[in-house]
Amino acid sequence: MEKQAVDGARRAFNSGRSRPLQYRKQQLSALLRLIRERQAEIVSALKRDISRSEFDTPIFELIGIENDIKLAERNLADWMAPQPVKKTLLTITDDVYIKAEPLGVVLIIGAWNYPWSLTLRPLVGAIAAGNAAVVKPSEVSKSSASLLKELLPQYLDTEMYPVVTGGVPETQELLKQRFDHIFYTGNSTVGKLVMEAAARHLAPVTLELGGKSPCYIDKDCDIAVACRRITWGKFANCGQTCIAPDYILCHPNIQHRVIEEIRQTLLEEIFGPVLPIVTAGDVNEVIRFINERPKPLALYVFSSNKKVVRRMLNETTSGGVLVNDVMVHYTINALPFGGVGNSGVGRYHGKHTFDQLSHHRACLIKSLVVEFSFSFLTIFIDLPLMFLLEHCVIS
Ligand code: NAD
């Protein structure tokens, strides 16, 4: 079953039909129709899977997919066009450019907490880049997985974009097959298994993993605003978001104020995720604390002090960093989204997904003009010479 799906996708890719701009745009607009026409079914599948509210589904899940599709539809012709590079004296008469071309068959393995976004946003990039793709949604969000399996073939090229459902055995069976790229979202332990499987075929990977995302609240900031934003980020999707703030770092002098502000924000709510608060003396200690741990997926800094902000940006690292807010960098598809070190490999969203799932081919088309000019010049030099020689010999 898994092998059949991969073989079919490879056959479809080898047919060449996913390459033309028109095909890619047609598949993208079909995917957009799916999202819009079947929204009610998607909402109720998510209600069954993770009890997501009707209001949250478009915001947390569908708008990002729609924006990526619309961006690709508008810009795909430019993205696919050869990108000329600066010429040198040696290449002055040549064509020298970079051409984004499809990689082949991509495997997309999704996670349960955002089951539509985490499978379909990579798929948008795979289609835009001209690839075939095998989509493996998470078995944990069972209703979404089976709805995706039912809906995708009604809108997209079935052979080119098959959906394989199932759990660990099915995913492991898929991982035995040869892919040209594997795009995985989930935990780091399985991420390592995915990378091992990809290594057997020297396939590149994108690994969108977890990772503790620290939240630093400086003494010099609007603590009420900081706490409101942090609490929203921590409680969105019941805390099940990869870039949710994991813990707060703050000075002991403001710890009580932070607790009080968070308590005020949560007055309706009695259940929720745990938000640890760690105290640190000064910004040096905060930076040391962060740098002693694996590289985070996101880092949040709340401060009005430019020097503190600059130091936090320059002296730490993370997949993404946000000053005076949390999580909203995810919604800006001009920004690359991804981790670093333990929090992931590669990046996506918007054009970054297209780039991630393309091969950027170096193209140099030598012109024969120079060769021709040389030959032409030699005619002018050689002919009189021959004439002279001949003349001398005869006389
Ligand atoms: P999950 O249980 O849904 O698993 C993810 C995928 O891995 C599934 O499709 C599943 O079938 C497959 N899988 C599970 N075990 C496997 C195995 N042994 N071999 C092969 N495949 C296997 O999700 P999860 O792993 O619990 O995901 C939660 C983690 O993902 C959290 O750490 C979270 O932070 C992270 N996450 C990261 C992002 C991101 O964008 N960086 C987004 C969402 C979640």
Image (cartoon, rainbow, N blue to C red):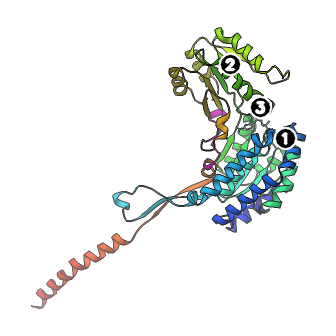
Residue 168 lies in the magenta-colored region: no
Residue 350 lies in the magenta-colored region: yes
Quadrant into which the N terminus falls: bottom right
Q: Could you tell me which secondary element the residue under label 3 belongs to?
A: helix
Q: Residue 310, image x and y in percent?
A: 51, 25
From the viewer's side, name the closer residue of 338 and 69. 69
Q: Residue 347, image x and y in percent?
A: 63, 43
Q: Residue 260, image x and y in percent?
A: 74, 13
The residue that label 3 is drawn on is 236
Is 342 situated above or below 351? above
Q: Amino acid at mark 2?
A: Ala
Q: Amino acid at mark 3?
A: Ala
- Magenta span covers which residues? 336-351
Is 225 situated above or below 256? below
The residue that label 1 is drawn on is 54
Rate crowding at label 3 as few (under 14), some (14 to 19) or many (20 or more) other CA atoms within 10 Å: some
Residue 273 located left or right of residue 325: right
- The count of marks equals 3
Residue drawn where x is 79% and y is 55% of the image: 34
Q: Earlier in the sequence, mark 2 or mark 1?
A: 1
